């Protein structure tokens, strides 16, 4: 039996410190980072997606960042295929692949080899559901999914219109729920180490608020304005992302900047809560608490030692 390919995964809610930890580990383990974020794939969407900086990417190899335009299609199946190939290539180079991010479905599709059954499509149904989202709002569409498939609805953000529509479509065409079509392997195909970062909720929410303020200072409003000026529709999946969707009404003169910023903060806090709910049900994750700021470096060292213990032949710690 051939040895399994090595894989480190770093997960946790937005703003908890995943990027900081991954850069430190990558420096010290000949690591290469695979973004496990469904938004960082889009070009020209940099500030709102909290991508690693150009300087950070120059020092540590990063993958699945800036690979498509905002109006191009992307899916969990595409991510799974790309990430699986990258994991093999990085292992073959003698480096340590690290998936880092907070999109639970994307990450779990790789760590546990989700098998996505192929089902038929109904363009007319999709068009009707899209119009429903536009006229009645994404929350109404999400509530429709909640009524027929609450498990999938709890996993999908209301703004993730494309996948919400797909989940409804699967049910309408087959009578089965999306979850019935996603087979999760009992055991990971990888020599896997999953690290989860968490912290006190009040502290996390404070960090989220500070991050949003910093994004605005860095030019998030102008970033969204430029995307609109280039003709990217607010209805695109990419433009439904946190920080983008909320600023469109401001740029159209419909709400104040203060309200738009507060909406980003509130929805990001809700998103962080859903991220934690998703990852908490994965027994493979080893959790580390970053609530005590003074102990942050110590916790990172503990994690580094854990990685070194598991992957001694490549770790330089």
Image: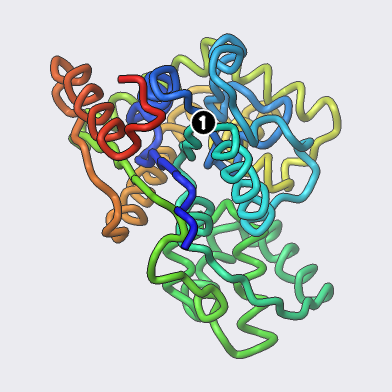
Image height of 185 relative to 37, above or below: below
Image height of 30 relative to 266, above or below: above
Q: Position of 201 compared to 89: left or right? A: left
The image shows residue 267 at horizontal and vertical percentages of: 44, 41
The reply to whether residue 45 is visible in this rendering is yes
Image height of 38 relative to 248, above or below: below
Q: Position of 150 compared to 239: left or right? A: left
Count of all numbered marks drawn on residues in the image: 1
According to the picture, the residue beneath numbered tag 1 turns out to be: 95
Q: Looking at the image, which residue is at 61% across and 54% down?
A: 80
In terms of image quadrants, where is residue 177?
A: bottom right
Q: Secondary structure at mark 1?
A: loop
Image height of 90 relative to 62, above or below: below
Q: Position of 130 compared to 187: left or right? A: right
In terms of image quadrants, where is residue 301?
A: top left
Q: Nearer the viewer, residue 82 or 53?
A: 82
């Amino acid at each position: 039996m051939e040895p399994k390919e090595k894989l480190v995964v770093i997960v946790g809610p937005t703003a908890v410190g995943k990027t900081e930890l991954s850069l430190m580990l990558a420096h010290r383990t000949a690591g290469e980072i695979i973004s496990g974020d469904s938004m960082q794939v889009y070009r020209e969407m940099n500030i709102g997606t909290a991508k690693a900086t150009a300087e950070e990417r120059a020092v540590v190899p990063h993958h699945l960042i800036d690979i498509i335009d905002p109006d191009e299609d992307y899916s969990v199946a595409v991510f799974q295929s790309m990430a699986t190939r990258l994991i093999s290539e990085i292992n073959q180079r003698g480096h340590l692949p690290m998936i880092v991010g907070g999109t639970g479905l994307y990450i779990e599709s790789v760590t546990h080899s989700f098998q996505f059954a192929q089902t038929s499509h109904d363009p007319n149904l999709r068009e009707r559901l899209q119009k429903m989202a536009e006229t009645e709002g994404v929350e109404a569409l999400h509530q429709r999914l909640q009524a027929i498939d609450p498990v999938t609805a709890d996993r999908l953000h209301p703004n993730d219109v494309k996948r919400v529509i797909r989940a409804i479509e699967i049910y309408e065409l087959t009578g089965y729920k999306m979850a019935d079509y996603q087979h999760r392997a009992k055991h990971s195909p990888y020599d896997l180490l999953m690290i989860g970062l968490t912290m006190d909720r009040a502290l996390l929410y404070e960090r989220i608020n500070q991050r949003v303020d910093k994004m605005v200072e860095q030019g998030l409003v102008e970033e969204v304005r430029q995307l609109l000026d280039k003709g990217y529709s607010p209805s695109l999946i990419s433009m439904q992302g946190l920080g983008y969707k909320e600023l469109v009404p401001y740029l159209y003169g419909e709400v104040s900047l203060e309200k738009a910023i507060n909406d980003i903060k509130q929805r990001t806090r809700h998103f962080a809560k859903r991220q934690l709910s998703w990852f908490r049900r994965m027994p493979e994750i080893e959790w580390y608490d970053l609530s005590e700021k003074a102990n942050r470096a110590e916790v990172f060292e503990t994690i580094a030692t854990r990685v070194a213990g598991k992957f001694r032949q490549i770790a330089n710690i």
